[in-house]
Image (cartoon, grey):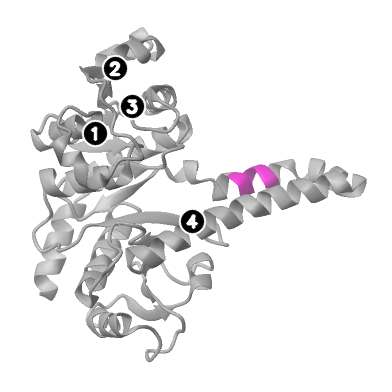
Amino acid sequence: MHTIAVDAMGGDHGPIPIVDGVVLALKKSKQKFNIILVGKSIDFSHRIPKKLQQYIEIVECDDVFSMSESATDALKRKNSTIYKAVELVKEKRAKAIVSAGHSGATMSLATLRIGRIKGVTRPAIATLMPTATGGRSLVLDVGANVDCKSEHLFEFGVMGYEYAKDVLGVENPRIGLLSNGEEESKGTEITKDAHKLLKAHPSFIGNVEGSDIFNDSVDVVVCDGFVGNILLKTSEGVASSISKLIKLNIKRSPTALTGALLMRKVFKLLKKQIDYAEYGGAPLIGVKDCTIICHGKSNKIAIKNAIYQARDFLESDINEDIENSLAKYS
């Protein structure tokens, strides 16, 4: 069985939603796996049912790397929960790590302690975006690399393609380069150079605009971490605002309230589609072992889905395929 290390203390709301997510994942999954929880057991051990204790090991640790700390200090904090969780993977006691703690610390430790796949210059954080047709598009990078060269963007395209194919099950994923216009002449000098490099990939469809991310015209969207993070946060804000506006206008009109009651199932499905918790976490693609970075405010549903993401990652040949693809194009 696969073993997944989980930083039990790193989230904004403490260990309870994280441990509850682990328990939920084990309860719902037909295929069992092992979990190593890193944290202060006195704070959460009472949440673990007796029948699931055989699948859960606890590594005691009460030093939490806070969100306010600098990611560069993570390497010095060898007794922190995130450091110990990463070390479990480095030492091969676990095959994957899931953390809702400091994303910069998780990324830095995974990159430096676990290491990069051969041929990867910069690992990238990838996230899923909902599309109007009910599908998903994969966007990377969304925060790991603020300053990128064209070669890095090319690597993101290759890594995103292999992830979409191997883990998400997309047949021949379409790769697009995020720009301010579809024309090849649009974009910065870096994206123009990246466009030339990505042309070598048979699944590259050219430049795409922001709206294309959501209309199912592209499967893998490539951008640098600065643009990607703004895109991610803006999308979250828009989804939240639309939900609040719908509720506000429904309350103002008795007719709208009646219609809303009749469409409760539709609204429930819509909420589920735009809820980040349904996508779990964001994989750090390009490191030697599976690393899933979760939102700090993750609830138990998000943690459950992040664990399932890790399991799906481990059951694929993603890292081997990335290494082989990059070797071919180099």
Q: Disc 2 designates what residue?
A: 40
Residue 304 lies, with reference to residue 172, above or below; the image says above
Kindly identify which residue carries mark 4: 233
CB within 8 Å, label 2 to label 1: no
Earlier sequence position, callout 2 versus callout 1 = 2
Secondary structure category for the residue under label 4: helix
Q: CA distance from mark 2 to mark 3?
A: 8 Å
Up-down relation of residue 87 to residue 119 (above or below): above
Chain part drawn in magenta: 267-271
Q: Nearer the viewer, residue 180 or 138?
A: 180
Residue picked out by circle 1: 82
Residue 314, x across and y down, in percent: 22, 42
SS at circle 1: helix
Q: Which residue is mark 3?
A: 9
Residue 128 is left or right of residue 41, and the answer is: right
Asked if labels 4 and 3 touch by Cβ distance under 8 angstroms, the answer is: no
Q: With respect to residue 105, does 200 lie above or below?
A: below
Q: Where residue 97 sits in the image (x, y, percent)? A: 24, 37
Three-letter residue code for mark 4: Lys
Q: Residue at x 37, y 89 (%)?
A: 184
Q: Which amino acid type is marked by label 2?
A: Lys
